[in-house]
Image (cartoon, coloured by chain):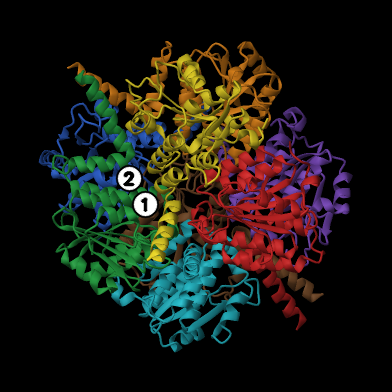
Chain colours: A brown, B blue, C orange, D green, E yellow, F purple, G cyan, H red
């Protein structure tokens, strides 16, 4: 069932970013990552889409109610992206407007994250895979009630042909070669969100500056 | 081997709830979830069956002996459900009355939980899958001696075509759309058993009340 | 600095229950206990106060804002208890009305829980201890951002003469002897919230019933 | 690749027990289970073989050297079982005498445990599966250097058609029905090695005794 | 407050063993040690008392009810030790017969274990310390609902002058010198319950045997 | 030894912020917090100093060598703070210029963080406490090689009169009352670094906006 | 998809060792193994290649920049191995020189380790598997940002036909029989890097020496 | 009870190194650190003694029996140090020769490590402290049966005036200032045993080399 890696791997030209239910209410349910780490991962993934100009689709679930609005950081980054405000469907893929927006991106590879992992990510990820999309489920920019739930969702999605990854994999596949023009943007995202790498950059820069004197 | 999600997913019309050996003795063996969390999950799953009027089958193993009686909370919720009191079979599926009761529900999708996960859940779950049922094994409303045991049972059931999930997935698949009539009941279960969601509801309600003044 | 146990130990006649900032917003910050376990502990502690008719003081912090209202379960249990709605003070002990309400209970032993453990519980607990109260800080009915934070708060409170405990200790000190009249109420709380004990009771009752036949 | 459960499941008539390298030296390498728990599991598994009169094969690796002798508990339980003392082969299946001894049992279902899990268990387990045996790898009566190693070994064995389980699963499949004559022996093993179950038995027996008076 | 080690340390002549509420019901509540490890520790501690002929006091709490009888392993080891069956007092030290039995041992150093750690062990341990006994609380032969509870109980007992230890410390203090006559008995207990040490002994014995040939 | 809380507690008027060795090299040694969480905590603490205009002292250890430069985020926030670049002293308190800079703040309460916790934080923290300063050691904005190291450092500092806390405690003590003018700055820091609280704010703001319509 | 074990297993004659990006900068990103354990594993794997004279290929990614140079321990061990210094490709398999160097080894079984596991190891491992190589991914001599990332990478590689293992498995497959001439070298590596085994050897040697006297 | 830091802190002139029971048998009992990490820490501590020419005392317990010989790495490093081979005393401090050897060092500050932490380290550490020595117990170069045992031993030693630390603290106190002549030796130990720091050095050296070209 596994798609060969050569067919899986993302490029900015054939991928779209799909962010599902990153709402200020629902995100309170996330307990498989420490809060600061979870926020870090969500922002990093969103910035990657920006850095590579990926067509992006946003969706929320009953955002006028307890689930809360899309977090403002994402709205500010993607003011013009379609935002499908679902009136009731739990799986975004059950909403025709959402599916239409995804199809309208024209991309066949979907980078998906959603809260919660087992429901809001897993359901549409499996449905999209069933319809022929290559789906990367970004598990660490999604979130679940506990670790066992995350692991069962990973296993279930894998069995359905979805490819569970962490956001750094997405960064690496999209960048592919550090000589490509997006490198500074990727580097900046690493500086802010993969800080051990950022500190390598800082340390190196300091040496370069010393050398230049 | 994976069943496509579109074929897997539950609806209240095609699902039955099967609760195996939730007895006051056997449940003492559960050490992969903290006690309060385990009880929470079992009650939540049972209430979901109630909320959606699922045909339900209960079974116990030698409940006059050390295994103890079915916990009264479940009996009280399902006074009229068939309760198959197995005289000795470890796997409920080896008991003809149990299989007959399951078949009598007329449903082909089974939501199963059992204590312990590796034995009382895994054996009948794999047997039911082998006979053509779509089986959801609700791992967090089941329980095992330790985490490694849980993980091996999840892996073994998956390999046999069973779909291991947590109770929230069951809730989400049965509800499917928050506009359906079962929403208040699902909401109430979330309030009591997925308390972080319940608190979102409370917080929202308080705002609504303030707004109404 | 340690108070001898004979002086520490609680009795229903000399204790008051103080619940601080159990609000539907703030409680979302708790990540040192799984959500279902945390809710379980908070309700158990509140019911203990009820079972022993402890004078009880409730307080909230800016409950019309993001912190959210007192969770309705507590308000319903204590409709007549003083609820000090603090306008801004982070430590409840900085609020004169709160201190007055505590003093008005006439009790010198305080059973305190608060969210979060390191701030909303630890500050007033240390202040009360400094003023001569014997203070039990119920850590598992309080909650913190992570485990290290909980442990540092426990250590800090201990150094200040506060006695960090879990809710079961409170139950046991208040009950002291199972022949006292409060036993059925304590037993019922154990049945619901210390379920492994509850199952012992169920199992025993089933045996007794069988014996009686 | 998954064998249906109905084909997998063990019975005392078609199973053999294979214990690999449970030597007093090598067992010092086990760090994925606490020492007391590991010893408990090994003895429990060995007693199950005894209880069901399973043909048993023992093997050791260079037991005159640093690896140490077979632990005396196992030798005492199985004084007459073939003990293949391998002169050098790391995988027992590379030793012709061992394979002959396994074949001489006449059984096609092998219950295997070995120290270490990733090497001494996994290699012969995968080789036996490749030759058509149904192989249960008893992971908790085996042992590895760390948890990640255990998990990778479980995954690798599963991919090769081996069925990783814990010893309680073996007990349950061999017993199958508590009305079968082996029940008292299984119960005794549970009493000693699955002590939470043993305590249920004790508690029940006390009630029965009280009832009899 | 710390007692100097030279005053603390145990010897068989000045110590008594106090085992509190190791009953087949209550022991089901233990979740801070895996079940097999907990049983291992309790039996090891009991055997140490036997090996050194320590005066021993047993006590149970309402053992005709849900708490269950003293586990038979302990009763069998200490058929003649006083067993104080408390009718209702939660703290054994609140029972005069128990205190009298402890005093009757004539020892001023008490090796105490009890289930649960935070209540049945901590209360009498602190009371005994307050009355001038040197008290070793054997935490790993006691048991609690979770790890945080264990840690708070350890901290509370320490603050009250109790000395929390593990059973191996008790073994080492009682043995003190491997040339003393109790060495074979201590060695046998280590073989069965500190199995990594037992395997060192087996390995050494095998070498000795080889040498003797 | 414990200072009463009323004497401990910080206010912006009597506190200084001391940041030790947050260098792009040394920070690679931190393994007791996940990287993203550690960075989050360091930045939050630094912003708190800014929000309350605390006098701040920075120091680095051989920052032209492998230890690397002060991370640029801190330098940018505190361009005018004294930066003591130590030529070799491991404990900053062994450097006279550093001590002079600390004294020059005129404050007697020091909020200290340093990498690593056990050395660069613990040594000067204990020295400052010995000289009469009230010292808060901000453990989660410091970092150690592993958790056991962190815990031993916390215990050692506590024994020396230092008060180990997390950054949220610092925030709460400095803010003290949400009606004080620094509230919006504290709120903004919480929004970015205690994101579960930030989401409460967002959720509330959305409700307010809806109400206003 | 699984290759039978008989086809998988390594021998020194048909295997090559591929070490990817073990650079002094990138290795700072590893947080799924404690630092000392990670270093231990990397050196052990490298020594195994040496012990069995495996053709070895080294590669680095932009080693003049922040990623840092190949760690000197590896360069010193393999002064003559091809070192492909990639100018920008993230996946080594995207670099033609690297693939050529791998092919030039003439081996079809590749023992690969890389930092980080999810990117620098997983990408080329999956690409090599796709081109027909048998690939062992040595996960514990590679390293990732956290444990969940490691587990997802293991699962992804497995699905693509790669075989994730730990370094001890590599040692055991290469040695295969302790009577082969490489045994002393393997033994020496175990002594230094699988120290519990090394201590068995020391203990045995001491006995032998005593025996010889 | 706490000794002020200014009095505690080590210098090479006033310290001795005491290594207790690092024997190839007893070290098999260590389960609170992964094996490779434990070995790393023991060797690092021993090298520190060497680097600073500390007078060193070695001792073993019945090293001709199952406990095994002193590990050869330590003997090779300290061929001339007194090695007190205790015939039976469990606490080294009960052996007069050992105490005499310690006193003969003329030092009043003792850096002690021992296996196991709770017995072989804790007993003599507490005895030495009682006799007026300043004792640093190096917990991560010692080892225990499990983490709870380590933590109780740390707490007990602390209460007795011993100072539990990790080996890096010892390194930092002995070095004190990187401009002192021992710096290269300390640096080399860090390179081998605190590898994240070693890699900083490598990275820096590479930069320096590039700069020099």
The image quarter containing residue E131 is: top right
Q: Nearer the viewer, residue H32 or A13?
A: H32
Residue at the image point whose x is 16% and y is 53% from the top: D12
Left or right of residue B23, residue C161 in this image: right
Number of numbered discs present? Answer: 2
Residue at the image point whose x is 39% and y is 48% from the top: D37
According to the image, label 2 marks what residue?
B139
Q: Chain of mark 2?
A: B
Left or right of residue H25, residue B97 in this image: left
The reply to whether residue D165 is in sight is: no
Left or right of residue C201, residue G48 in this image: right
Q: Position of residue D83 (x, y in %)?
A: 26, 64
Q: Nearer the viewer, residue G176 or D43?
A: D43
Left or right of residue D107, residue A54 in this image: right
Residue H73 vertical placement versus H207 (above, below): above
According to the image, label 1 marks what residue?
A152
Residue at the image point whose x is 60% and y is 80% from the top: G76
Q: Nearer the viewer, residue D194 or H128?
A: H128
Classify mark 1: helix, strand or loop.
helix
Classify mark 2: helix, strand or loop.
helix
Q: How many neighbours does mark 2 have within 10 angstroms: few (below 14), some (14-19), or many (20 or more)? A: many
Q: Nearer the viewer, residue D158 or C63?
A: D158
Q: Quadrant of the N terminus of chain B?
A: bottom left
Task: Give how far apart the Cα atoms at labels 1 and 2 are.
Answer: 9 Å
The reply to whether residue G149 is in sight is: yes
């Amino acid at each position: 069932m596994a798609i060969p890696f050569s067919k899986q791997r993302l490029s900015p030209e054939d991928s779209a970013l799909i962010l599902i239910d990153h709402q200020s209410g629902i995100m309170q349910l996330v307990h498989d990552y420490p809060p600061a780490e979870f926020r870090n991962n969500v922002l990093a993934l969103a910035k990657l889409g920006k850095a590579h100009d990926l067509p992006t689709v946003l969706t929320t679930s009953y955002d006028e109610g307890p689930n809360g609005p899309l977090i403002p950081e994402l709205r500010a980054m993607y003011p013009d992206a379609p935002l499908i405000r679902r009136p009731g469907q739990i799986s975004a893929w059950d909403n025709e407007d959402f599916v239409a927006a995804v199809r309208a991106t024209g991309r066949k590879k979907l980078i998906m994250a959603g809260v919660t992992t087992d429901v809001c990510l897993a359901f549409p990820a499996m449905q999209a895979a069933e319809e022929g999309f290559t789906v990367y489920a970004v598990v660490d920019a999604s979130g679940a009630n506990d670790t066992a739930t995350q692991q069962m969702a990973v296993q279930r999605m894998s069995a359905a042909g979805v490819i569970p990854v962490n956001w750094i994999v997405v960064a690496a596949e999209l960048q592919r070669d550090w000589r490509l023009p997006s490198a500074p943007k990727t580097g900046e995202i690493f500086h802010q969100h993969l800080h051990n790498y950022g500190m390598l950059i800082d340390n190196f820069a300091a040496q370069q500056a010393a050398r230049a004197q």
